[in-house]
Amino acid sequence: MNDVLTRLSELLEQRKSADPASSYVAKLYAKGLDSILKKIGEEATETVIAAKGGNAEEIIYETADLWFHTLVMLSHAGLSAQDVLNELARREGLSGIVEKASRAE
């Protein structure tokens, strides 16, 4: 799984220098953070609707869109999927209640 995220992160970095007329991702970068965030919001809503509908194919498709656009946002911010994976690894084995409480301090 990590290989796919690594390859996609590398591709997203390459798209930063691509022509917005020839690359969807380059077009998103050119439009700026607000447009990227708007797209994440749209995809999150579509993911929720798909989950409510219960169709596995739609849930997978919409979740892939959501993850993809979230990766675009991370790349725009100079972050990567690996940064998120590192955070998930840090949290592994922690109680969710304990982890959330540690952020409140």
Image (spheres, helix red, strand yellow):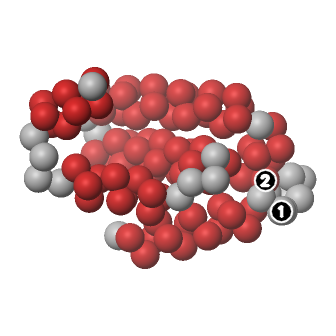
Q: Residue at x 40, y 34 (%)?
A: 47
Density class for disc 2 (Cα within 10 Å; few <14, some 14-19, many ≥20) is: many
Q: Amino acid at mark 1?
A: Ser
Q: Quadrant of the C terminus?
A: top left
Query: Residue 4 versus residue 73: which sits nearer the camera?
Result: 73
Mark 1 and 2 residues: CB-CB less than 8 Å, in contact?
yes
Query: Residue 92 versus residue 17: which sits nearer the camera?
Result: 92
Residue 2 position in % (x across, y down): 38, 70
Q: Residue at x 34, y 42 (%)?
A: 59
Residue 17 marker: 1
**Depth-wise, is mark 1 or mark 2 nearer the camera?**
1
Distance of label 1 from label 2 (alpha carbons)? 7 Å
> Tag 2 or tag 1, which sits nearer the N-term?
1
Density class for disc 1 (Cα within 10 Å; few <14, some 14-19, many ≥20) is: few
Against 105, residue 73 (above or below) is below
Residue 36 position in % (x across, y down): 66, 37
Residue 24 position in % (x across, y down): 75, 51
Q: Amino acid at mark 2?
A: Ala
Against 58, residue 92 (above or below) is below
Q: Residue at x 57, y 48 (%)?
A: 74
Residue of label 2: 26
Against 56, residue 32 (above or below) is above
Against 32, residue 85 (above or below) is below
* Left or right, residue 70 beside residue 12: left
* Left or right, residue 85 beside residue 10: left
Q: Quadrant of residue 34?
A: top right
